[in-house]
Amino acid sequence: MKIMIDIGHPAHVHYFRTFYREMSTAGHEFLITARDKEMSHALLNGYGIPFVSRGAGANSALGKLLYLPRANMILLREARRFRPDVFLSFSSPYAAQVSALVRRPHIAFDDTEHAKLGRFMYAPFTDVVLSPSSYRGKPMRNQVLFKGSLELLYLHPRVFTPDPIVLGSAGVQRGEPYSFLRFVSWNANHDIGASGMTLENKRRAVRELEKLGKVLISSEAELPADLSGYRIEVDPTLVHHLLHFASVSIGESATMASESAVVGTPAIYMDRTGRGYTDELERRYGLVYNFSDSPSDQVSAIEKACALLSDPEAAERHARGRDAFLAASVDVNATLLDTVRSTVAAHLS
C-alpha cells in the first residue's frame, strides 16, 4: 500500500509516527509532506522520517487563504509522482482537496470542535473522520468515533516507555519535583482571536511554582529575557519523557494536557472554549483541570497547580485515573489501520 500523509503541526508528527514505523516495517510505502511550523521538521528528522517540505505557510486568516493554492499545487505535484492509495492527515484541507483531485480516499483525525473554518475546508473532501467519542461538536456524516484520545497513538504504554536518563539533559535529578509549563504560539486556524496567558500571569506562574520545585518551560512563542532561562533545550523527541516525570503540567495546549493525562501527570489547561476530550479527562478520570483563559481564571489555575504540588496523594490519585482511562480506551493505532484497510478496499471495489 502507498500512503501519503500531510503534516501541519508538530503534534501531527506524533499522531502518525507509530503507524509510519509499523507499516514501513511491514513493507508499505509512504510519502510525507510537512509544513515548516515550529518543530515539525526537527521532529521528522529526529525520528528518521523522510519528508517533502511545503513551506512555512501563514498565520493570519488572509495569509492562510492565499497559501491554500500554493500548498495544493505542492501536494498535487507530489501525489501525481507518488500515486498514493490513500491520504491521511489531521484535518488538512490540502490533503483533502488534493485527494479529491486525484480520486483517492482521504482519512482525517479531528478532535477540535471549534475549528469550524478548517472543517469547512476539509470535511467535504474526506471519506472518514476519526474522532474521540468525547467529541462534542455536531456529528459529521462520515465521522467515526472511538474511545480514547489521539495521544494514545504515541504515548500508550505499548509504544512509549519513559526514560529517566532524559532528566539530566534538563538539569533535573531523579525524584526532584518540577513543573512543566507549555505556552503556544496562537497562530493555528482555530486560534484566531485567542491570546492565552498574560505575560504577568506567566511570570506569576513561574514565581509561585518555583517555590515548590524546579520550573521547565516549553514555548512555541518567544519568551522575555527574565523567563528565557527556564526554557528547556532538549531534543524535541524527548519532551514526553520530561512530561511523564513532571509533578504537574500547566499551560495553553490541549494536546499537552491530554498527553499529561496519558502519561499520568496531572494537567492544568487554560482555554476559552475547551475541548471535549479535556472535559472528559476531568469529569470521568480526574486527570485534567480545565480553566477559562480569563486573567482571573489564570490565577486560579496557578493556585490549583500549586495545590497539586503540595498534595502528597496527588501522584497516586492520578495514577489510578490514568489506569482507568487506559482500560476504557481502544488501541487507536489498530483503529487507524482497520480504517485505512477498509476505506481503501471500499474505494477499489
Image (cartoon, rainbow, N blue to C red):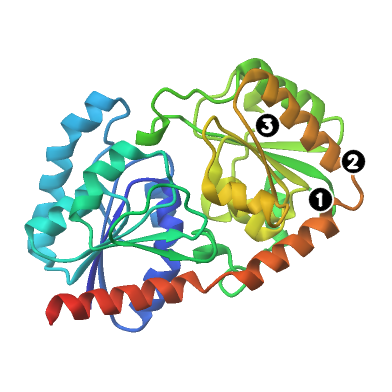
Report the amino acid beneath label 3.
Tyr
| Mark earlier in primary sequence (2, 3) | 3
Residue type at mark 1? Gln
Q: Residue at x 80, y 30 (%)?
A: 303
Residue at x 29%, y 83% (from the top left corner) = 27
Q: Secondary structure at mark 3?
A: loop
Residue at coordinates 74% horizontally, 44% vertically from top-left?
A: 248
Residue at (57% x, 35% y) in the render: 252
Disc 2 secondary structure class: loop
Amino acid under disc 2: Ser
Question: Where 166 sits versus 344, above or below?
Answer: above
Using residue 212 as the reference point, say whether residue 278 is left or right of it: left
In the rendered structure, the answer to whether residue 338 lies left or right of residue 347 reads: right
**Secondary structure beneath label 1:** loop
279 vs 116: above or below: below
In whole angstroms, how far apart are the C-alphas of marks 2 and 1? 19 Å
In the picture of the structure, the residue carrying the numbered disc 3 is 230
Earlier in the chain: of badge 2 and badge 1, it is 1
Screen quadrant of the C terminus: bottom left
Residue corresponding to mark 2: 310
Does residue 82 show up?
A: yes
- Give the crowd class for mark 3: few <14, some 14-19, many >=20 residues within 10 Å: some
Task: Tell me the CA gap for discs 3 and 1.
Answer: 16 Å
In the picture as drawn, the residue positioned furthest to the top comes out as 200
Whole-percent x and y of residue 226?
67, 19
* Contact check, label 3 and label 1, Cβ < 8 Å: no
* Mark 1, other Cα within 10 Å: few <14 / some 14–19 / many ≥20: some
Disc 2 versus disc 3: nearer the observer? 2
Residue labelled with disc 1: 173
